[in-house]
Image (cartoon, rainbow, N blue to C red):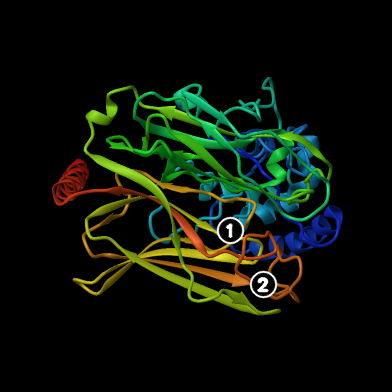
Amino acid sequence: MRINPYCSRQIKSKGALGLAVLAILGMAGEAQAQAQSSLSINTGEVTYADHVAQIITDNCVVCHREGGVGPMQLTNYEQVRPWAPLIQYRVENREMPPYAYDHGIGIQELQGDWRLEQSEIDTIVAWVQQGAPEGDWGDRSHPVANLPDPDQWSFAPQFGEPSLVLDSAPIDVPALGNDMWHRPYVLTGLTSDRCIKAIQVKPSGNAKAVVHHANSYVETLNEEGEYEEYGMFTEYAMGKWGEIAPEGVCRTLPENARIRWDIHLFPGGVGATAPGTVIEDNVVEIGVWLHPEGYENQVKYKQDLKSYRLDQGELIVPPNATAMTQGIHSFDHPVRIDSFQPHGHLRMRQASLEIFYPATGRTEQISQISNWSATWHHSHLYQPDVAPLLPTGAVLIIKQWYDNTSNNPNNPDPDFWVVNGSRTADEMTHAWIAVTHLDQQGYDEILAQREAAKQRSVAAE
């Protein structure tokens, strides 16, 4: 069963939620009429009881429940039926579940992938087209969602409770005001170097709506006994699930380190269900799952997470206009790209990752996100057996597109001059990428393993 482990707020930049819903319902009716002739499967009778209830329970109820962040509850037929046209529209356009990663382009094998299967989408569309019938439950009961606690760690079902939890210093966030930054320090308490298995940043309670991002950096003691920066610890932006390091590599958390927080807070919150009230004692937590001591001596290769900039001079998006940025990066050694997470604010709409191979002149598209939203920053974790391998000298090409027009539903003001900056009203142009640093031997070994797996697959056919 696929359960979305995290929920956040959806942006509605103009008008009340009810008006936005009515507008979408109108579009849903048009989409439904168009879809009548386009559905390609022979569905027969499709009912809520037999076909749809389990899909919605597994994929939607985690947010659309009492106390959830979804704008309506979808826990039973009576609650679902009035929203059937809207559900069809959002599902058919792959706006829900909220995981904007294009199908059919580049690598599709991802960890933590919330997207529905096409067969599930077709089932929901057919059900709505047939009048959204409930069907006969017989002696069955409505499926019950195996819902995680909203405050549960994303990776607890997989790895158990975190080995280490690091809290930021509490801070009160007002109901209204300008962007705020909070930069406390916290000691890790580790007495030896350890390798990170997984990591998650989790704002507590209503803080999810007011924490725009929460980056953290590792600092270690130098010979003079003073702290200096060691490297990036982790990154968080609204909606992010977390990060998992592949087996056989070490993402190091050094001994006797301290963590320097860089937390960006937005009073009032972002999104239709943002609290708009004072958040007292706002705390952001980092949960860290560690490999056993000694693991660092068993592995050869290191992984790190860095921000790869796309800046081309000063980013400016004029009023009622669009813009695009592009950045390139190459390595003097072979690497594996383990994850890709584009970052921007309210005007960013699309992003892509490509690899250019100078030896052959070939460009390979790896990932594309065509309907990006600032309230769902996903770190797209590639399955290790398909994660992109780059030979020495290959070039990463990262592109991001910005829409400062009224066509962008997330845009609060298309008449505003948008420039590069840290405020929510500004824009940013970079991507967070996790990289495993290899040598030629490691690169060749992974290539050989993949080729052997391919041959076994062909032989099995």
In the displayed structure image, the side of residue 87 where residue 299 appears, left or right: left
Q: Marks 2 and 1, how far apart in space?
A: 41 Å
Image quadrant of residue 214? top right
Q: Nearer the viewer, residue 135 or 246?
A: 246
Q: Quadrant of the C terminus?
A: top left
Q: Is residue 344 above or below residue 254?
A: below
Q: Secondary structure at mark 1?
A: loop
Residue 316: x and y, percent?
A: 60, 76
Disc with the residue nearer the chain's start (2 vs 1): 1
Residue 276: x and y, percent?
A: 83, 46
Q: Nearer the viewer, residue 14 or 110?
A: 14
Residue 331: x and y, percent?
A: 27, 60
The structure residue drawn at horizontal position 37% and vertical position 46%, both measured from the top left corner, is 304
Looking at numbered disc 2 in the image, what kind of residue is underneath it?
Answer: Val
Q: Secondary structure at mark 2?
A: strand
Residue 296: x and y, percent?
A: 27, 30
In the displayed structure image, the side of residue 195 where residue 360 appears, left or right: left
> Residue under circle 1?
39
> Residue under circle 2?
418
The structure residue drawn at horizontal position 15% and vertical position 50%, both measured from the top left corner, is 444
Looking at numbered disc 1 in the image, what kind of residue is underneath it?
Answer: Leu
- Circle on res. 337: none
Q: Seen from this angle, which residue lies furthest front?
A: 224
